[in-house]
Image (spheres, rainbow, N blue to C red):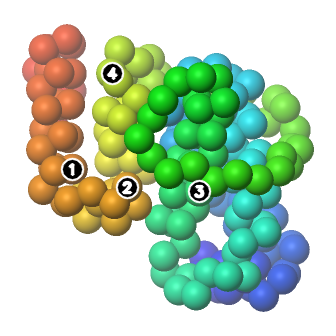
Amino acid sequence: MLEMIEKARKGDKEAFINLIKLVEKKLYVIARSRLNNEEDIKDAVQETIFLLYKNIPKLKDIQKFNGYMAKIMINSCNKIVIKKGKHISYDVVQNEEFLIEKDKYEDIDKKLDFFTIISFLEVEERTLISMYYSDDYTTKEISKILKMNESTIRSKIKRIKEKLKQRYGEEGIE
């Protein structure tokens, strides 16, 4: 994957397309954790792909691509939420839209029962728990992406797990 990121960074369009194919599920998962409307999710994914394409040449450390990508996705989601008149606490980036196939993510959506389970959580809680469990980010990586203290992230994840245990019982919650 690092080789593909490097090629995409140097302007290889085919490498960028292949890179997006590798990360599109992660993009969708992050968007789904923050947004409930399928059209908004698709818009956030589209904007993130556009911003990645536009800004990947500026990425100095290809090892940090996943965090960079996640931050752009979170900001794209925040932009949509703010546009609809709701307030959230993360920075927002402003840019143009990039169109991709509208129905591309329907199959992924069917596989994501996880989001039904966590749908009662607050936006920040859904983001944290999906980054931790669905995207397999470490608490250290999440803290860097969200610019929060790592111990705060661990505490929040612990409280979220407690909420899930209270709602669904002990089974299946680590």
User: Up-down: is 95 above or below 3?
Assistant: above
Vertical position of residue 1 compared to residue 89: above or below: below
Q: Residue at x 49, y 81 (%)?
A: 63
At 70% from the left and 75% from the top, the residue drawn is 56
Return the residue nearer the eye: 139 or 19: 139
Q: Earlier in the sequence, mark 2 or mark 4?
A: 4
Tell me if 105 is positioned left or right of 86 in this view: right
In which quadrant is the N terminus drawn? bottom right
The residue to which callout 4 is attached is 121
Label 4 element class: loop
Spatial distance from mark 4 to mark 1, Cα to Cα? 16 Å
- Compared to 158, does 139 lie above or below? below
Q: Earlier in the sequence, mark 3 or mark 4?
A: 3
> CB of mark 2 within 8 Å of CB of mark 1?
yes
Element marked by disc 2: helix
User: Gap in Å between the C-alphas at discs 2 and 1?
Assistant: 9 Å
**Mark toward the viewer: 2 or 4:** 2
Kind of residue sitting beneath label 2:
Leu
Of mark 3 and mark 1, the one earlier in the sequence is 3
Q: In terms of secondary structure, where does tag 1 sit?
A: helix
Q: In the rendered structure, which amino acid carries the disc numbered 1? A: Ile
- Specify the quadrant that holds the C terminus: top left
Mark 2 and mark 3: Cα distance apart in space = 11 Å
* Residue at mark 3: 72
Q: Residue at x 13, y 14 (%)?
A: 166
Question: Which residue position holds label 2?
Answer: 146
Residue type, numbered disc 3: Ile
Q: Amino acid at mark 4?
A: Leu
Q: Residues within 10 Å of mark 3 (few under 14, many from 20)?
A: many
Circle 1 sits on which residue? 153
- Say whether marks 4 and 1 touch (CB < 8 Å): no
Q: Nearer the viewer, residue 53 or 20?
A: 53
